[in-house]
Amino acid sequence: MSRKKKNKESLTDAIPVALPPSLASHVELYDTDPDKALGRLHQHMRRRGNDPVGYMLLAFMYKQAGDQKNALESALKARIFAPGSLFMQKLPYFLTHPDRFEAWITEKRKSSAVRVPDQNEFLKDIDNLIDTLSDASPKNIRLRDDHEQAEDHVEATNRMADKIATETLASIYEMQGKTEKAVETYKLIAMRDPSRSKYCDEQITRLQDMANLG
């Protein structure tokens, strides 16, 4: 089904940061053909891997298209893969609270440029990120903001953050060749959410088969 933009603002105007040329071309395409732009950006991301700036752009594209679920999921991945960026840390929350997002961006523009991490910056902090996600109980992995979050939908946002953060941790372990830790993480996911047991069992079997082949 074709995606239609929900407002008249172009994606170029909606993104408050400068993008590298390799990503800027996708923004220009989105303003004329959203579906084609999303498809090409997904292809780009498959080649680039865990690129936080790419995930940020995906989040804005999905938000512009009115797809809040995929926008939030992409924003959470950008946050996870750029642990040193204040902008990325706040992005998931601001996507669900656009009024506060616009206020924050306006304030940042007055004081200084919004910081976007270097393409490979997240690699410097990946071990610390793994330690943080491993040591914290998944129930404590939460979107945080200075404002009091009393709205009912925040709980749903937090549950999604838990799931994506934990699955991302499993993926990081797999990329690093830490198969046993990846398996343990999928077991944890299955224990916390029995409805995902079949999926987790499939991932565990796949990882164990890969380990045996190695």
Image (cartoon, helix red, strand yellow):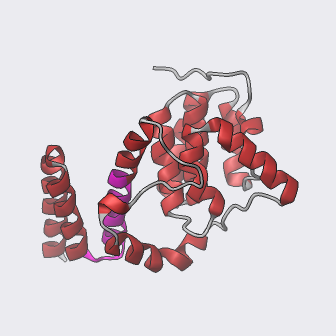
Q: Is residue 177 magenta?
A: yes
Which residues fall within the magenta stretch?
162-178
Residue 15 image position (x, y, % from top left)? 71, 43
Q: Residue drawn at (30%, 69%), measured in percent from left and top?
A: 174
Residue 134 image position (x, y, % from top left)? 33, 73
Q: Is residue 47 magenta?
A: no
Q: Residue drawn at (40%, 48%), measured in percent from left and top?
A: 158
- Whether 171 is drawn above or below 63: the answer is below
- Whether 40 is drawn above or below 186: the answer is above
Q: In this image, 209 relative to 176: left or right?
A: left
User: Which residue is at the front of the view, 51 or 151?
Assistant: 151
- Whether 168 is drawn above or below 106: the answer is below
Residue 136 sits in which quadrant?
bottom left
- Whether 125 is drawn above or below 89: the answer is below
Q: Residue drawn at (19%, 69%), measured in percent from left and top?
A: 184
Q: Quadrant of the C terminus?
A: bottom left
Label the magenta part by its dominant secondary structure: helix
Q: Quadrant of the N terminus?
A: top left
